[in-house]
Amino acid sequence: MASRKVHVLAFPAPAQGHISPMIHLCKFIAQDPSFTISWVNIDSLHDEFVKHWVAPAGLEALRLHSIPFSWKLPRGVDANVAGNVGDWFTAAARELPGGLEDLIRKLGEEGDPVSCIVSDYICDWTQDVADVFGIPRIILWSGNAAWTSLEYHIPELLEKDHIFPSRGKASPDEANSVIIDYVRGVKPLRLADVPDYLLASEGQEVWKEICIKRSFVVKRARWVLVNSFYDLEAPTFDFMASELGPRFIPAGPLFLLDDSRKNVVLRPENEDCLGWMDEQNPGSVLYISFGSVAVLSVEQFEELAGALEASKKPFLWVIRPELVVSGHSNESYNGFCERTKNQGFIVSWAPQLRVLAHPSMGAFLTHCGWNSVQESVANGIPMLGWPYGGDQTTNSKFIVEDWKIGVRFCKTVGQGLIGRGEIEDGIKKVMDSDEGKKMKERVENLKILARKAMDKELGKSFRGLQAFLEDLKSLKE
């Protein structure tokens, strides 16, 4: 009889930014012949996923499965979900556990029984499913360590009425002046820098309960793998490991485990931009991408376009079909494209890992999603932070104040218009000033530390992941 394998079931949150690190982790696990992996998506995402899926070398044995869900998200979480987050999580917790339990039973009847569940932190209901089968759950935290500490401090943040405030949402002045200095392992930050989903007030009772519950569920996981690296956030890792034990570990940057320099994509990538980048001067290109969820108003789109044109910098701009709410004005957009045809290159989706590693990359105007931030850091690229929501506001604070490797604009995407003058000033500061040169030096130093973390001999993240694999192997004994 063939020897039993350790059967890992991976369940990522259904969003591009959460799927990528989970795939990199699964590729790493699959290199060891002791493991077999089942990958589970919600059905609408699965149907899209299989269209783009080409099993990477070493992941031929990865089996793709789906479970039913009433919300249809063929490209993952979108702006509609972001605006109805309580409803979405409630539906997930109601509908998905039964489907996952049925699948685990079916997999056990057909082959090696499932040994453990590796799931995204925000899928906390998977812990209850794991408990039904008496198997461990491993959390993959697709954000940074500071975010784990902020979530861990939800009880204290609530007690001080700083989150889900009973007196109504803080005014912008208050949000900018209230300092939160009791989140251990994290430098003091303004209330405005706290992930925005914790700051809502009206009609958020359901969402509040979900957040409170999951801040405790984390303690029941066998491992917590954080997609960040120790030298970037040492005090945070030290604090969280003192609370949760030595199995709370830095495990990033996970994309560095993957030599293919490809993320899993739910949209077709346009690789023609790499040829265009080959023709640009080293360090000259401004890359603009707002990730897979953020949207801009028509007015904001026009201001950004005007700033790019005025900057005279070569630019590579990712414009998803749904980036502009209600669409851009064709007349002004066509005029912009015509005037900048020798200056810029526009794609609907870019091969970001290869773009950021390209010698002509100069700076990255980003929504500050954690994958984008960490990919930029690990390639030594300074940033212009323009967050949209979630943990992105917190990430942009770290970029500017803690790590000093970029600038941020005075408002987030959702808070109102940022004029072309401010955007242009930001571009000049990062790409043309003495201060910008210092940012570049700092981010180049962090690049070295990021890559050191995944060194196969000495890397702290790499060694932690190896210890994690050895522990999983004990599950079949």
Image (cartoon, rainbow, N blue to C red):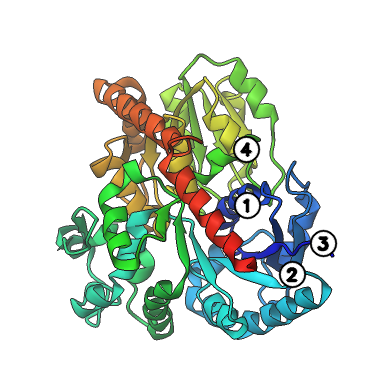
Give the residue number, with chain letter if any, for mark 3: 2
Question: What SS does tag 1 mark?
Answer: helix
- Whichever of labels 2 and 4 marks the residue nearer the N terminus, that label is 2
* Residue depth check, mark 4 versus mark 3: number of the one nearer the observer: 3
Disc 4 residue type (three-letter): Ala
Mark drawn on residue 29 = 1
The residue carrying pointer 2 sits among few (fewer than 14), some (14 to 19) or many (20 or more) residues within 10 Å by Cα, namely some
Q: Residue at x 55, y 55 (%)?
A: 470
Closer to us: 477 or 48: 477
| Place of residue 158 in the rendered image (x, y in percent of width and height, measured from the top left) | 25, 77
- Whichever of labels 3 and 2 marks the residue nearer the N terminus, that label is 3
* Residue depth check, mark 2 versus mark 1: number of the one nearer the observer: 1
**Measured Cα–Cα span from mark 3 to mark 2:** 27 Å
Give the residue number, with chain letter if any, for mark 2: 66
**Measured Cα–Cα span from mark 2 to mark 4:** 27 Å
* Residue depth check, mark 3 versus mark 1: number of the one nearer the observer: 3
In the figure, is residue 458 to the left or right of 428? right
